Image (cartoon, grey):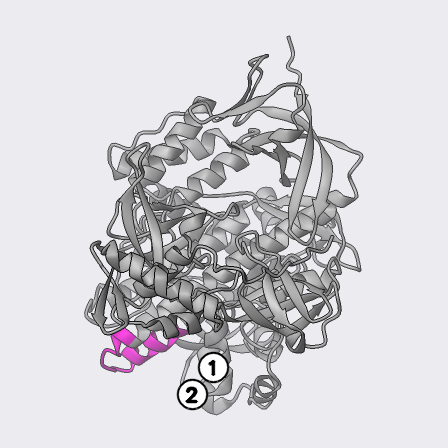
Amino acid sequence: MTRKKKRKSKKGISNLTNTILSILKKDRNQSFNYKQIAAKLGVNDASSRNQIIKTLAKLAAKQEIVQVDRGKFKAVINTEYHTGTLDLSAKGSGYIICDAFDDDIFIASNNINKALDGDEVEFYVYKRKKRGKLEGEITNIIKRDKSEYVGVIQIHSNYAFVIADSTKMYKDIFIPINKTFKAEDGDKVLVKLEDWPENADSPYGKVIQVLGKPGDHNTEIHSILAEYGLPHEFPQEVEAFANKLDTSITEEEIAKRRDMREDLTFTIDPKDAKDFDDALSFEVLDNGLYEIGIHIADVSHYLQEGTVLDDEAYERATSIYLVDRVVPMLPEVLSNKACSLRPHEEKYTFSAVFQMNDKCEIKNEWFGRTVTYSDARYAYEEAQAIIESRTNEIPKDVSLTGKVYKTDQKLADAILKMDELAKIMRKKRMSSGAISFDKVEVKFNLDQENNPVGVFFKTSKDANKLIEEFMLLANRKVSEFIGKKDPKKTFVYRVHDEPDDSKLASLQGIVSKFGYKLNFKDRKTTSASLNNLLKEVNGKKEQNLVDTLAIRSMSKAEYTTHNIGHYGLAFDYYSHFTSPIRRYPDVMAHRLLQHYLDGGKSVNEEAYEDKCNHSSAMENLATKAERDSIKYMQIKFMQDHKDDEFLGVISGVTDWGIYVEIISNKCEGMVSVRDMKDDHYAFDQDQYAMVGRNTKNMYQLGDEVIVKVKNTDLIKKHLDFNLIGKKETDA
């Protein structure tokens, strides 16, 4: 249904007093006369000018503004202003996150003053009359977080409006008819904000890209990327530059490197992987020690600073893993070919080589550029079969070839021994206070048209953990090699701060409803009780909910030049070194490590900190896009199951309804309180429950319920359920 916009007749300027105060407070160091204010309001008739003159006089009489020169006024500033970031809700109100306050500051919708979600804003604080809690009003927008939005265009005779997909964009965007970019009515478009005049109800913008028809698969996937300002293809000049690179393996270059082509080497990756950026080598030395090499694609050999290829990789900062595709950081000639450690091919690599004993005590370490040759490629399922059977036979149902085959015994023995070592390293890590987050990943079986025909869950088994432990070892030891040896040298660290006490308290409050207890006395008891919680919920109906809440209670990991350690992994030093094909910080780590190995002096810390901040920000956007693509595919999957009833767990309770996550496929939808017809329900915050006024019937967080699909909205990525009732329990 289209929304019709009515233009107000200019009998008077509505809310003029507040508007004038807002203008003067926004530019409080500048003075304005009535003509300048009229210009900002976009009015020039005599009646409006008289209204402005009279209002200025009234405000001056009340001493809310002051006349600083003949006919020129300034706002009277008698309050303290702060800056922070606006976190807007779908209802139009929001909270400002500001370091000056322990708690976030509530901002009512009428005090948002044209700020948008994520904006850096100036605001002042006052106490709410009823409860005495702090509330704020935004007085100035310092920096917009984003200027581009995805939405559906509605074209009228002389103008158009774009209704944004994002629920956090609370205004439709006005588009002059000459700035529609030939979009047709109902098209999904990308629009850029250009202005938001003082007297305008909506921001003004222009269409910069037509994405396609809403509901079309590629349109929706490209819309997800466009919403976060992420690309879906490489510029022609970048592709051309990459295709001209010399990717041959030369004797001249080999002579500069440690030659490890004779070492037994293999890769273990997902069965559908196309880029293999890490390999392992294994050798038993004469002294009984094990020499294990972690070999990483030497992306920095091809990715030279100052080139269009490097500029593009830096801007992207990460590969994006959507449900049906990968948007790579590097063009295919590098990501899937030259830098991919494919079997039976020589490759340039950057390696961390360790000599260790049966207790995983490292007796020697070496870092540097190498040339390697992968003897075999295994899927995780194949390596897992070797670990479980303790033989070299790969069953038909897991083999990449689709046939039963016996792999080389030396390779099988290497996998088995490295699995033993990985388990020792993991045990040491957990005893040091590491937290074991093995959250279930939702995956989809897709048909040829990328329609979801099934849902399955990816879990981490021994083969996954084998790779994980050796990658963690390389990342930690590279970081220690620089940071421990010479802390003054600039390096790129992956850090993870301690969790916030208030978030842990909130987690305790929720999991206690399921009968779990946590101990936050100190760091050791905190990590131990979190691990115990994650172990206890494994396989239970509330597992995904508790896993998600536990992860949310943690601080966000980020890239920085200032090392504070990694809380979740219980490492004092940690960097990302092992995935340069898909992460730019790993490329930076490679470059810096080689620079210091060559005897170079410390590089500019401020420049690298800026690069770290950019990489963290892009990683965050990529994560949001990946989550949106999963949500989109879940809703698409549920479109074909509207007649089915599903068992779910109540995963959230709010005053507008309950959220239910289906156990069999992890799809989450909402049951509106308006659709709960058997009683008048109200939200009980203390019990995390919706309680019936008459029956006292309670729907509480964690309850198992039966639901049916009411509505699926692919465009808004929203799923509505009808509540059938609670799951019947055995007497």
Find residue 310 and name its label: 1
* Residue 580 visible here: no
The span from disc 2 to disc 1 (Cα, nearest Å) is 7 Å
Q: Are marks 2 and 1 in contact (CB under 8 Å)?
A: yes
Q: Is residue 531 magenta?
A: no
Within the image, what quadrant is residue 332 found in? Answer: bottom right
- Quadrant in which the C terminus appears: top right
- Checking the image for residue 306, the label placed there is 2
Residue 641 at x, y = what percent? 78, 39
Query: 243 left or right of 612?
Result: right
Number of numbered callouts drawn: 2
Image point 32% across, 53% down: which residue? Answer: 566
**Which residue corresponds to the image point at 42% horizontal and 52% vertical from the top-left?**
87
User: Is 182 on the left-hand or right-hand side of 12?
Assistant: right
Taking 239 as reference, is 315 above or below it? above
Q: Secondary structure at mark 2?
A: loop
- Residue 592 counted in the magenta span: yes
Start and end of the magenta stretch?
586-606
Residue type for callout 2: Gly
Residue 328: mark in rendering = none
Is residue 114 or residue 661 the one in the foreground? Answer: 114
Residue 9: percent from left, percent from top: 58, 61
Instruction: Please tell me which residue lies in front, 716 or 605.
Output: 716
Expressed as whole percent of the image width and height from the top left, the position of residue 447 reads 78, 55
